[in-house]
Amino acid sequence: MSDWSSSSQLAVRPPRARDSHPLVVTIDKKSRPRAVFSGDQLIEVDLPVGARVVYPRPPLEALKDVDAAIRYALTHPLNSEPLYAKLRPGMKVVIAIDDLSVPLPPMRRPDVRGRVLTVVLGLLADHGVEDVEIVIATGLHRRMRAEEVRYVVGDRIFDAYWPKRLYNHDGEDPDGMKYVGTTDHGEVVELNRSAVEADLLVYVNVNFVPMDGGHKSVGVGLCGYKSLRAHHNPEVMRACHSYMDPAKSALATSAGRMGILVEKTLNVFHIETTINNRMFDRPLEFLHKNEDDWTGGERAAFRGLSFTLSKLPRAARQAIFQRVPAPYGVTGVFAGECEAVHRQTLERCNAQYLVPVEGQADILVCGIPYISPYNVNAFLNPLLVQVMAQGYLFNFYKGQPLVRKGGTMIVFHPCTDDFDNDQHAPYIEFVHDVLPQTRDAVEMHKRFEEKFAKNPAYVEMYRRGHAYHPAHPFFMWYWGEAGRQHVGRVIVVGADNDYIPKLLGWETARTFAEALAMASGGNRGPEIAMLHVPPIVMAQVTA
Amino acid sequence: MPASFFDVDGTLVRTNLLHPTVFYLANQPNPLRGLGSLVRAAAGAPRMALAEMVDRRRFNELLFATYEGISRDRLLILADEAFDTVVKRALYPGARDLVQRCRANGHEVVLVSGALDFLMERLAKHVGATACIANRLEIKDGYATGKLVRPIVAGPEKARLIREWAKSHGHDLADCFAYSDSYSDVPMLSVVGHPCAVNPDLRLGKLARTYAWPVIHLGRRPVLTGLLERIP
């Protein structure tokens, strides 16, 4: 156990009878320390007696025959005619696929997108449709590299289509975007021209979390800055409760309005897929379990892994985690009209992730892992650490936030001041130039966002390099806005510097015990809850 | 309003100062004289290479000395052809887009190059730049003397010229952008608020990585350079 993770001297409320769900474990005197990610290190954290730990559900059973499920979904679509009935020889079909921001880590081959594409392309060929393009719906994310595309779509499709008929979306191509319309709320919908002008647009999604998919697929994946700024702004982000609950997310509402316009204007056929949360393969599968249930072998494996990681240089640790894909199983394939499909998808997603929790906590404890949707094959830079804490982990709830209004988040991460120069070039200027001037999302939105978004050098890096769009770091800050507005303070344990946490508006503690003492402030024993991620778990919190 | 300052050779076009020089020397009215000039230029190549390593300005002086004796009329008559044959063809894909994007953002775009003014004026017009700061050959009695009119546009002098240009045109350098491929242009990149390395040589690539300057590859990026840049 790391010496900075001890908390034995703190008094905490005794366990409560209402935490009766088997996946909500109340720490008692016999409980072992919990295994937590701190970036690409694994540490042990000794939680006080009475703290609750919310564990992820076991992986849902995967479909036995995924290809058959895909074919079935295409021929038995929801609220739509079958895909084959929409096809005619000589028509132009554009297929858009989700980019590598989902799932995390990338799934073991064959990726479900490649499997869907194989079936769809076969169907198109059978019906004499030859004019086919595949667009990777990157939105304002970075372009995928050739080898990453190959990994996702498979060798056969890659060799046949890349790069002329299989390519990354470019939201800044002046000739490649087309105005679709404006919603009654003034949201401008401008999308990839090929997709808009196609006779049929097929969207292939991997619904990793409930905020993915639905109207967001086409409306975000194929849009540019003009459209994205309609909902990726401080005002909308603050009105999300949470991102993972589309019914209570202003972001989903805005994307929905834009999506309805898209569906009215374009002929879109949606294919959504869901996966289970089997993130870790056999040697690391125990990370999914309650530490009290680990076998002797699993405890030894954890200690070995933890020790090895602590001795390896960062590059090696990164390589270990980044190169090990996850053995996700496909749990559902749904096709047809957008909203009908997405209802089914959400149901399956929620069945995998939601765990009922009674009552909020004063302190939310989370480890921050090495990966986010925005740093596949790159380092998790400080701005993304913020996104993971106040954006994703805070938002892994439905109903009420797991932490009370004004409560404290204690997170574990080194917060190293390092960036990937190729992928995150605009992030560096954002963190080291904008954040020292203001942390106020509204102010930075007004003063800096547009200047960044139009910076020709950064735009060029987005268009022809592999960088995120220059507006993206702003979106990442806004992404944390709902969490920032709700949480009173964030204390980071294990930071290797004070500067970055200070820029983020966070406090630092050398040990977990110190963080707990800071958070409790000498008051009565605080209620503590830990989200045991990864794999993903979302708390369905009731009063 | 910001301004964007672009180095040209290696940044927007894949040619360097040698290419148009060879074109001019090879296209003299008297072929024998042209051949002689080429041979003399080839013989001076080692000196030029040495000068390039030590001082960019000295390299320019040695290179443009080969223009001695060429008439102004000849220089201008051949300018369109030299531009079309040598410069325009060598424009990197995306170079024009980048300049156009700067213009669309309201930037004044200034080409800052050690190449000759009459070629740079044509390039500026072609890519949509608003001005150029370039070297000028000294002309006496209608013929090039082989000397350059001072100041010579190269190395640290580019930084001074940019400062002066920005001041006289009312630009705040903190808002301005500069683009170059070469380590010799670090002074020029350093005086603006938004420096950017374009197709950088190894030393500039490393420097850009260290200072987190944006790096753009308008041409094909050599794999080896990409790897070497990452070595501290």
Image (cartoon, rainbow, N blue to C red):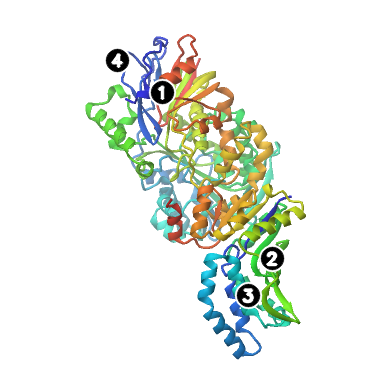
Establish if B52 lies above or below B183.
below
Which subunit holds the residue at mark 4?
Answer: A
Q: CA distance from mark 1 to mark 4?
A: 21 Å
Kindly report the distance in space between the C-alpha atoms of the residues bearing marks 3 and 1: 67 Å
- Point 71% across, 75% down: residue: B138
Q: Are marks 2 and 3 on the same chain?
A: yes
Q: Are marks 1 and 4 in contact (CB under 8 Å)?
A: no
Question: Which label sits in the foreground, 3 or 1?
Answer: 3
Residue A472 in the figure: left or right of residue A279: right
Q: Is residue A258 visible?
A: yes
Q: Circle 4 is placed at which residue position? A: A30
> Looking at the rendered structure, which numbered label has been put on residue B64?
3
The amino acid marked with disc number 1 is Thr
Please tell me which residue is depicted at 62% across the width and 39% down the height of the picture: A260
Name the secondary structure under disc 4: loop
Cα distance between the residues tagged 2 and 3: 14 Å
Is any part of residue A199 visible from this angle?
no
Q: Which residue is mark 1?
A: A511
Q: Quadrant of the N terminus of chain A?
A: top left
SS at circle 1: loop
Residue B72, x across and y down, in percent: 72, 80
Q: Nearer the viewer, mark 4 or mark 3?
A: 3
Q: Which residue is mark 2?
A: B151
Q: Amino acid at mark 4?
A: Lys
User: Same chain for the residues at labels 1 and 4, yes or no?
Assistant: yes
Given the image, what chain letter belongs to the residue carrying mark 1? Answer: A
Q: Same chain, marks 4 and 3?
A: no
Of badges 2 and 3, the one in the foreground is 2
